[in-house]
Image (cartoon, rainbow, N blue to C red):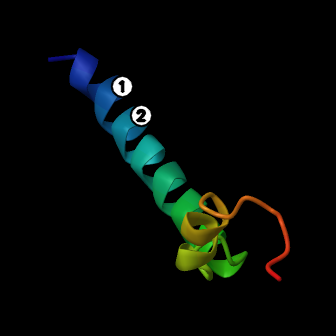
Amino acid sequence: MNHLIFLIPIALGLGLLGLLAFVWSLKSGQFDDLDGAANRILDDGEPKP
């Protein structure tokens, strides 16, 4: 039972850290262009005539 005193704050801290990382990625524009990377992988890089 004494282990829960340590494990619960650690779990809450890791959850908060994950939430903060997700919010940071939203604010920095990581999810703005979801289709660009999907189309870029199919492009061979040669200009079209």
Tell me the residue that label 1 is attached to: 6
For label 2, the SS is helix
Q: Amino acid at mark 1?
A: Phe
- x 53%, y 51%: residue: 17
Query: Few, some or many C-alpha atoms within 10 Å of disc 2 (few <14, some 14-19, many ≥20)?
Result: few
Quadrant location, the N terminus: top left
State left or right for residue 1 relative to residue 2.
left
* Horizontal arrangement in the rendering, residue 46 relative to residue 23 (left or right): right
For the C terminus, which image quadrant? bottom right
Residues at discs 2 and 1 in contact (Cβ within 8 Å): yes
How far is mark 2 from mark 1, CA to CA? 6 Å
Dot 2 amino acid type = Ile
Graded by Cα atoms within 10 Å as few (under 14), some (14 to 19) or many (20 or more), the crowding at tag 1 reads few
Numbered circle sitting on residue 42: none
The residue singled out by tag 2 in the image is: 10
Residue 20 appears at what percent x and percent y?
56, 62
Image coordinates of residue 12 in percent, x first then y, are 37, 46
Compared across the picture, whether 35 is left or right of 9 comes to right
